[in-house]
Image: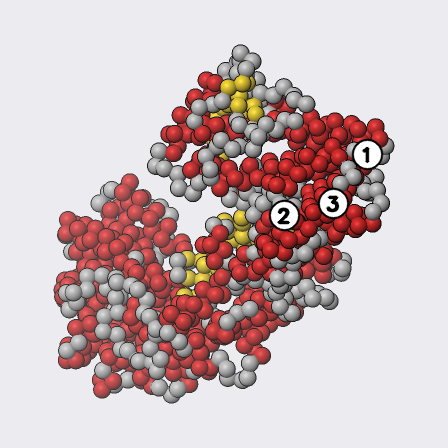
Amino acid sequence: MGDRVGIRLLGPLELRTASGGFVALPGAQRRAVLAVLALRLGRVVPVERFFELLWGEEPPARARAALQGHVAALRKILVGTPFDLGTRAPGYLLTGPAEQVDALRFEALAARAGEHAERSGPGADAEAIGLLERALGLWTGAALADLPDTELRRALAGRLEEARTKGLIGWARLRLRQGSGAAAVPALELRVRADRLREDVVALLVRCLHQAGRPADALAAYHHARQLLDRELGMVPGAELRAALSEVLAGGPAAGPGPGAGPAEPSTPRQLPRRPAGFVGRDAESRWLDRECGPGRTGDGLAVVAGPAGAGKSATVVRWAHRAAGGFPDGQLFADLRGFDPAGPADPAEVLGRFLLALGVPESAVPEGRAARTALYRARTAERRLLVLLDDAHSAEQVADLLPAGADCATVVTSRSALESLVVAEGAAVLRLTALTGVDALRLLERSLGPERVHAEAAAAEHLAGLCDHLPLALRIAAARLAARPGWTISGLVAELADEHTRLSALETDGEVGIRSALLLTRRRLSPPAADLLTLLAVHPGREVDAPVAAALLGTGLDAARAALGELAAHHLLGESAPGRCGRPGLVRAFGAELLAEQPAGTGRPALGRLLDHYGTAVRHCGEHLEPGQDGHDGAHPPALLPAVSDTRGALDWFRAEGPTVRALVGRAAGADPARAWRLALGSSALYGGSGRPGDWLDCLQAGARAAERCEDRVATALLRGATAHALIALERPEEADAAARRAVAATTPADGPAHVRALAARSLGAALLGDHAAATRSAAAAVALAEESGSGPLTAHALGHAASAALLAGDHQGALRRARAARDQLPGHPATAVHARSMLTEARALQALGQAEASELAWARLLVTCEQAGFAHLRAVSEQSYAAFLRALGREAEAVGHLRSAVGLFRPHGHQAVSSPGRAPAAAGRSRRGGSSGAAGAA
């Protein structure tokens, strides 16, 4: 029954050389390399696969070099044979005729036999028997027995042995059907001795013994198997074995299998859901799944696809599975694990039962307990090439027993949770499915609405995609509403969705499918602290949060807050936008607002108070780097952790991320908690001044001033008006600035200390800008005298810095130089404060006006370095522009152009104007060659 082959794997590994004879290759590892290449003939075998076969989980340090040596030796041996061994990323590829590899020839002969057996008639049966006998005749011993004993070798050998057993079963059934079952008895007895618990083989042996006229031996074979099943598995014989016993006891002739029975068992499950319609995008994700779980994978065959509700996890995986199904000839299993179902997640034991039935286990043979079902499932999948999809998993524990045992099986799990335990325990690879790209989101809309309708309102369509967070589910619902109403416009639906209070209602359907429904299912699986945080995040007006903010909202310690925040991120209700910071999608923000609205009135008020205290202390902590000795007001709830900043740049970087939240909080709390609101606005003033966003600065201060007026706090109102004057100066609105400063002066007296000093300082600058130098000088002198009398170095530096700017604007260059240097002397340990940098700007301009070009250039250079190191973007832009004017005056046009370009690049992000060429007067320089509002911007 033998067939000419070139590589033998079904027994001791041998290779037919160019001389025509078989030789046994030296070295178990070299034989293993050839074996895995031959089994995957025509497919690339990754290097890691060789490592696993040769050394298991612990390859030596020189594993790659050893593998290269084996490959080089095999290439020499294969010369003159029909096989060629080449290098192909990420490993090696063996090509050649498949019919000359005995294991592949066995598969081909068995497949042909199956086709013949499915036809009726003695001729087809005889042909199938002949093919199977040729296939079985290829075996010369145990498969791959002379390879290194690793887990992968055992898995590969087990798969080959399983194929041999299936071929034997098919052959014996055909013999039984032809009435020649006696011929199959010796082979079946050998197989039963090798695997005593294979009920299908034992049942065939019982029938063949009975047909051979040996009923006593048939009964003995049955009872021996029954005792083994009871003792080792705690099971009773299944339906097939009991039916064989019944035939023996009936005493009639043994019945063979019915027409059409052949070598293949009717246990190839095809359980994939239908292919999703209207699918777009996810090409990169499909390629990732190919690498991790596809038939030619380089990964370990276990993947978790995690993502938020509505991201299209199930659709992505099912679509990929349909494409990959051909590489899993033993079938595909699918289970909806209902991880977030209100009725609770699916019981793994029930899922195992369904899987066993799909794999051909008779219902009567399915064990009762989960452990026994798991053992049988592992046994049934050990030698198969299956694809298993586990959809909507709740936890790693739910999934663990559903993982197949076969090395050639692959499993893909979807979940709203990251299932980190599965990654740790089983080495699963994780793909985090995020929202669609903008292009794919529009393609999805076009699928439902037609390209013409989308292109006609292109801007509205992009806005609609953004309001849907680019999530496929939300986009499909929105598109379905528009498709059902041809008279609607996309912009009309955008207007409806723009209101966060009604957005989720607009994205619901008549059934159970909807964004709110999906988010509610996720929320039910959260711990109480995480669920509380999801609700209280509605109090936070920003898009991003960190652990200290979460601690403030919850009123807990930092560890508990981190745990709650991590749980929300694990369920993809938050996404990590930067290390330690989590962003909230718009739909989740709307959901949180709904949750908070459902709570009793006032539920969010304590959280808002804690949040205001957190930010109030944080801005003063950061502001201390820019303006030491701020007038602080301690809140009732100190933050769990202050921002980790150690210098001015770090403080400004923190504030650039948190500034929008601070401004929104001041506006929100101005009515509900005005005392905290004005304190937060005042505490953030120095940071706004340093960050160079005067428009936002002004908005925040005006909201704070209204809150202070509501509290009828005269001093607080004056402090905020004085700060408002500086923001207006930065915006080049000197008349309004001077009016605000005069109101602050009028509302305070010297007894009010710092509030009056700051008001006078602001008034000195406002008056100087309007040309009232006498008033400016009086106010500056009064501010300096009161500050010096207080003994406060930071306050005195503040007053002197303003006096220097006023003197510069008045043309008193020597006085400006003297006061600017005196201001810096007040803060010897703070070389990067706002006062320090602005005084350096005044000094550079004063030296320039005094004709001291060399000293002025040195001052400009020091100023630019200080601004760059400290992160004073706006002040650096003003300095670059002024330095360019200085260089142009010296005739150094090329250098001037470079600094002007730097100024333009720095001004532009903040919405300011700057000159575009050195031939134009600086736009911010405005009014006079003594500095104009350019000097004012620097002093503000």
The kind of residue tagged 3 is Ala
Which residue is tagged 2? Answer: 197
Does dot 2 land on a helix, a strand or a loop?
Answer: loop
Q: How is the image coloured?
A: secondary structure
Quadrant location, the N terminus: top right
Marks 1/3: CA distance?
22 Å
User: Residue shown at 83%/47% (left/top)?
Assistant: 251
N-terminal label among 1 and 3: 1
Which residue is tagged 3? Answer: 216
N-terminal label among 1 and 2: 1
Q: To which quarter of the image does residue 204 belong?
A: top right
791 over 217 or under it: above or below: below
N-terminal label among 2 and 3: 2
The kind of residue tagged 2 is Leu
- Residue 187 at x, y percent in the picture: 67, 34
Badge 1 crowding class, 10 Å Cα cut-off, few under 14, some 14 to 19, many 20 or more, is: some
Visible residue check, residue 326? no
587 over 263 or under it: above or below: below
- Residue 405 at x, y percent in the picture: 56, 48
Name the foreground residue: 413 vs 488.
Answer: 413
